[in-house]
Structure formats: C-alpha cells, structure tokens
Image (tube, rainbow, N blue to C red):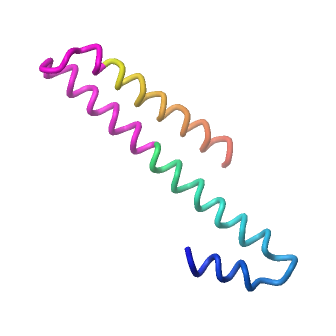
Amino acid sequence: MKAASDAWLSAPVKQPSRALEGIRWLELGVRNYQRSMQGLTLTLLAAQIVLIVRIPRPIGYAMALAGKTYLVVEIARGIKYH
C-alpha cells in the first residue's frame, strides 16, 4: 500500500486519478471478499448450531439470515461494480 501511495504522490498531475482509481478498486475487491467470507462463515456456523441443538435454534436461524444477507449484498455489489 505504501508503494501505491508513493506512486500516486509522485505521478504527474493528470495521472493521480488513475492511480487512485486502482487503489479504490483494490479496496473494493478486498472488502467484498472479506464480507463474502464473513457471510459464508455465519451461514455455516448457523447450520452447525441448528443441527447440534445445544444452543437455542432461533439464534442459529438469526445467524443464517445474517449470513445469507451478507452473501446476497456482496454478490449484488460485485455485479454492480463488474
């Protein structure tokens, strides 16, 4: 990230927007990946809770809903920015 910011600061006047755009796309991609993995983790953990039944099932259902929401939102964002 430091190399990218140094390149951006040393770029000619007309090119900082390209460097900044590249950093922004990188940030969006990493954030979407992180949120997708968080949604998948919540969904799988919810399935485990519902199947084992040591923890009340409504907690598992709420986690499943949150996980699926994360996944749907990140897929929609990926389609929008692609």
Quadrant of residue 38 in the image?
top left
Question: In percent of the image, x 29 and y 14: which residue is there?
Answer: 58
- Whole-percent x, y for residue 50 in the image: 22, 20
Query: Horizontal placement of 48 versus 16: left or right?
Result: left
- Whole-percent x, y for residue 73 in the image: 55, 34
| Image quarter (top left, top right, bottom left or bottom right) of the N terminus | bottom right
How many numbered marks are there? 0
2 up-or-down from 59: above or below: below
- Tell me, yes or no, whether the highlighted magenta stretch contains residue 2: no
Query: Horizontal placement of 26 versus 55: left or right?
Result: right
Quadrant of residue 8 in the image?
bottom right
- Whole-percent x, y for residue 81 in the image: 67, 47
Query: Horizontal placement of 63 versus 19: left or right?
Result: left
Residue range (magenta)? 36-60
51 up-or-down from 25: above or below: above
Question: In percent of the image, x 48 and y 50: which residue is there?
Answer: 33
Task: Considering the whole magenta stretch, tell me its main secondary structure.
Answer: helix
11 up-or-down from 53: above or below: below
Depth order, front residue of 59/33: 59
Quadrant of residue 60 in the image?
top left
Question: In percent of the image, x 34 and y 34: which residue is there?
Answer: 42
- Tell me, yes or no, whether the highlighted magenta stretch contains residue 56: yes
Depth order, front residue of 44/20: 20
5 up-or-down from 53: above or below: below
Depth order, front residue of 5/44: 5
Depth order, front residue of 57/40: 57
- Whole-percent x, y for residue 53 in the image: 14, 18
